[in-house]
Amino acid sequence: MTPKTKLACRNVWKLYGAASDRILQGNPNPSAQDLRAEGIVGAVRDVSIDVNEGEIFSIMGLSGSGKSTLVRCLSRLIEPTAGEVLFDGVDLLGASEAEMIEIRRHKLGMVFQNFALLPHLTVLQNAMFPLTVQGWSKSKAEEKAREVVELVGLKGREDYYPRELSGGQQQRVGIARSLVAEPDLWFLDEPFSALDPLIRREMQDEFLSLQGRLHKTIVFITHDFDEAVRLADRIAIMKDGEVIQVATPEELVMNPATEYVEEFTRHIPRSKVLTAGRLMTKGGAGAGAPVQQSDRISDVAERIITAQDPVPVAGPGGKIVGSIDRHAIAHVLFGRGAGE
């Protein structure tokens, strides 16, 4: 079944400079050299992407690649110079400021690297804040906020102030505040990058757990490919304001579209990216309980290597679609990896 597109952008540009509002009129697709010649910075250049309902879509790139600017264009926190941004088929660029305020209040959630908690409010009050702005009664807002605070693992800390929380706990409050209005679309701009490694891993686990329960459509910015591989269904790689490739983590590593993407993914261990479905023998027989077609090799390698016989691989619905043996695993762990 073809997935439903929740968010799409078509030929989106964001240009900065004195002549930025005129250059596209005479040249609808200027090159980087054309822009530089006019003294214009091409922060986002002719980007077209589709984000499917219920998926985690990661946007990656080095500093200055345009990823944060693109997300701010998608949410209309900044105005694109040109293009379309379609949310459930409706062009957000045609919405009035009042309409955008209502969309952000009710349908869009946002979490950024700086937690931006209100220091004079407790955990519960911070989580309630979006509902208070929407005009909810205090009792209803408090009831809903308590549910979300518990969902993010902060039950018992409702009366704490931000200064009394760790960085990871503060980030959970930010997530709770973002989720309390039950947004249809969730934007996260490097929300874990300021956290210590152990807390960051814990927050990634919590994030995946939340997504397993809530099934939100998420646009997630990160510069950490390990994080994107762990969290994302698909990844867009950006460079100099352009989207170079959109693919699953596995496809990016095994079939990079350009030398830049290949270099970007070069040092990622294949076992973290490749799935059992990629390495299995289709139709092959196996013994014992199956692994899933979507399981990452790093998660099932020990079991397969220690098995005496090939292990069956199950597809969607539990049907056995193939098998995988220790030789395929060893090739990835100790050789150069499948497809190389």
Image: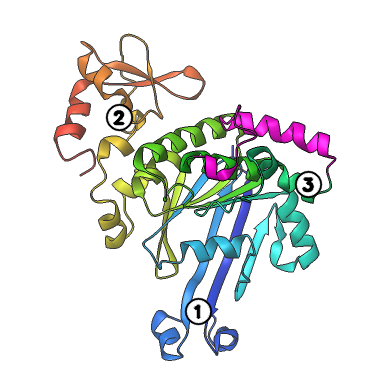
Judge left or right: residue 302 versus residue 196: left
Q: Position of residue 284 (x, y in %)?
A: 31, 19
Amino acid type at circle 3 is Thr
Compare residues 186 and 320 and report the one nearer the observer.
186
Above-or-below relation of 155 to 61: above
Kind of residue indicated by mark 1: Asn
| Whole-number angstrom distance, CA of label 1 to CA of label 3 | 45 Å
Count of residue discs: 3
Q: Is 155 covered by the magenta stretch? A: yes
Quarter of the image that includes the C terminus: top left
Q: Which mark is residue 29?
A: 1
Cα separation between marks 3 and 2: 46 Å
* Residue 31 on image: x %, y %: 43, 80
What separation in Å lies between label 1 and label 2 (alpha carbons)?
42 Å
Secondary structure beneath dot 2 equals helix
Q: Residue 151, percent across and down?
A: 61, 30
Residue range corresponding to the magenta coloring: 136-165
- The answer to whether 64 is drawn above or below residue 27 in the figure is above
Please identify the quarter of the rendering in which residue 273 is found: top left
Q: Quadrant of residue 306?
A: top left
Q: Residue at x 62, y 28 (%)?
A: 150
Residue sitting nearer the eye, 33 or 71: 71
Vertical order, 224 against 101 (above or below): above
The structure residue drawn at horizontal position 74% and vertical position 68%, both measured from the top left corner, is 94
* Of callouts 1 and 2, the N-terminal one: 1
Within 10 Å of the Cα at label 3, are there few (<14), some (14-19), or many (20+) other Cα atoms? Answer: some
Residue at 46% from the left image edge and 52% from the top image edge = 190
Residue at disc 1, secondary structure = loop
Residue 340 visible to an observer of this rendering: yes
Q: Look at mark 3 in the image and give the residue it sits on.
A: 132
Give the amino acid type for the residue marked by disc 2 in the picture. Answer: Ile
Q: What numbered label is drawn on residue 297?
A: 2
